[in-house]
Amino acid sequence: MKSASGAIEEGNFLTDGSLISEWTCHSCTYVNRRRIALCEMCGGSREREQENGAPSETAANGLSAIINRWTAQCSSSSGQTRTINCEGRAPDCIVETFLHHFRGQAANTPHWPRVYFDNDVGVGDGVTREAFALFWDAVRGRMFQTQGGDLSIPTLSPAYNSQLWEVIGRILAYTVAVLGQFPLACICQVVCRTLLGLEGDEDEDVLVADFLSTLSERERDLLSPLLSYQEEELREFVASRREDLLAILREFNVSSLPATCQMRSLLVNVSRFSLLEAPRAALTAMQVGFQSVSGRAFSGITGQAISHWYEQTAASHI
């Protein structure tokens, strides 16, 4: 295969002796590994990227590119590797081991966490990736609760104080480095924006979509029209389903329905309260923990870049 300069690729090198670098997809900003001709994320061609030359500022600051740089920063931190030995794969064991290990990891130079099970080192980082994935599976339903939907949000409980949520934030920072992504079932787009220092509710459509994803299918079907129906259609819908709507909304301290023209605002406010205001203490502590590890690694990220990453990642998991 020829490069943009005409040299032919052999292994990981060009025939002129230079190393083939990673390349950033012009379409979705995903940073691909060396010899891949088509983008692993969206299928875009590498040739167009080579013709265009250096990646644009938008591509360089895409969330995929930032995550890849963050992974590289952790894995090349002066050879610092810290081991975590789990006695088994039971959820309680993994959660307690991780919390104990990262509780003492306050602001520090990033390192690469290496997880073992019963002192079994495994091959490469496969065991480490498995352990981090198992951790987030284990905390879902405990520290992150679902209201019947696909997304979970921080559990409001006196048992979970700010110090514990700060530890979760540290674990999240290393999770992103190890797995190359945010754990989608626990960290929705609105929460991700908040943790990275943006306004979680700057995009009302995203805010409501994430909120609806925390609910059961029946509840989503009942509340979605409040956002999408036109006034006359909405008025008829509300009149026919008033009691069903109130039964759901009372769970969020809504005792009566407003005028039809205010239904969208009602749904936006309920979404904001559920995702951002009620768990505010947990989110603030998680942000502190996340940034104590990642520093300024995610600075410069935009809400648009986060939305693009979540759309692309969600599509790849279908």
Image: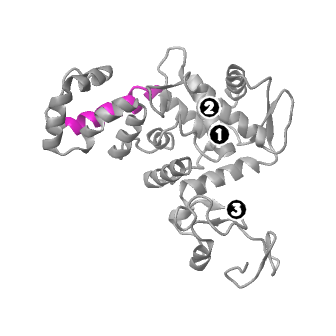
Give x and y (percent) for residue 135: 66, 30
Give x and y (percent) for residue 145: 49, 25
Q: Which residue is mark 3?
A: 33
Q: Earlier in the sequence, mark 1 or mark 3?
A: 3
Give the residues drawn in magenta, as a range: 263-281
Please name the amino acid that badge 2 sits on: Trp
Badge number at residue 212: none
Q: Secondary structure at mark 3?
A: loop
- Is there CB contact under 8 Å for labels 2 and 1? yes
Pick the front one: 276 or 317 = 317
Q: As displayed, is residue 251 above or below residue 129?
A: above
Pick the front one: 162 or 182 = 182
Q: CA distance from mark 2 to mark 1?
A: 9 Å
Q: Which residue is mark 1?
A: 175
Q: Which residue is mark 2?
A: 136
Is residue 173 found inside the magenta-colored segment of the image? no
The residue lying at 34 percent from left, 45 percent from top is 205
Q: As displayed, is residue 204 above or below residue 50?
A: above
Q: CA distance from mark 3 to mark 2?
A: 27 Å
Residue 258 visible to an observer of this rendering: no
